[in-house]
Image (cartoon, helix red, strand yellow):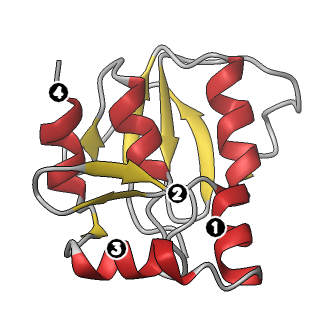
């Protein structure tokens, strides 16, 4: 389950494609059409997204920083695929294809490295600090 709510300013079609690739579903009201008509903000909730005109201050505001946005929307309790991992100094991201290869072929070297070097899933706070510009 995706866990982090956030807002992206000035979304574009690439942002929508990324959300769709992660399995997010567009939430729309009956008044909305199925076309791509971005508004000023893109809201990402737990498993869904929608364009909005304004946002709540309690949601993480990514501004226009797509690195932070991409790190946050990948946060998932059920997997490490496509998420940022860190040991506090080093950062790495296991892409979905790498994740499947690691666990389908039992490549224990990568798993041992992650355990031995004390990697953990990056928290929202760590992702924001790491990608701040």
Callout in the foreground (4, 2): 2
Cα distance between the residues tagged 2 and 3: 11 Å
Q: Is residue 64 left or right of residue 58?
A: right
Quarter of the image with the C terminus in it: top left
Decide which of tag 2 and tag 3 comes sooner along the chain.
Answer: 2
Contact check, label 4 and label 1, Cβ < 8 Å: no
The residue at the far right in this view is: 34
Q: Residue at label 2?
A: 94
Quarter of the image with the N terminus in it: bottom right
Q: Residue at label 3?
A: 114
What secondary structure is marked by label 1? Answer: helix
User: In the depicted view, which residue is nearer to us: 9 or 17?
Assistant: 17
Badge 3: how crowded within 10 Å, few (<14), some, or many (20+)?
Answer: some
Decide which of tag 1 and tag 2 comes sooner along the chain.
Answer: 2
Q: Residue at x 50, y 48 (%)?
A: 44
Cα distance between the residues tagged 4 and 3: 25 Å
Which disc number belongs to residue 132?
Answer: 4
Cα distance between the residues tagged 1 and 2: 6 Å
Badge 4: how crowded within 10 Å, few (<14), some, or many (20+)?
Answer: few
Decide which of tag 4 and tag 1 comes sooner along the chain.
Answer: 1
Q: Residue at label 1?
A: 99
Vertical placement of 28 versus 22: above or below?
Answer: above
């Amino acid at each position: 389950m995706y866990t982090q709510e956030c807002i992206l300013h000035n979304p574009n079609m690439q942002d929508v494609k990324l959300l769709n690739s992660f399995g997010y579903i567009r939430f729309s009201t009956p008044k909305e059409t199925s076309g791509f008509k971005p508004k000023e903000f893109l809201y990402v909730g737990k498993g869904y997204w929608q364009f909005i005109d304004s946002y709540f201050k309690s949601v993480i505001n990514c501004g226009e920083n797509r690195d932070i946005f991409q790190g946050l929307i990948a946060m998932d309790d059920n997997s490490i695929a496509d998420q940022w991992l860190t040991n506090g100094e080093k950062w790495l991201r296991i892409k979905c294809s790498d994740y499947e290869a690691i666990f389908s072929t039992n490549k224990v070297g990568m798993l041992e490295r992650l355990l031995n070097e004390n990697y953990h899933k990056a928290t929202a706070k760590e992702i924001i600090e790491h990608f701040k510009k």
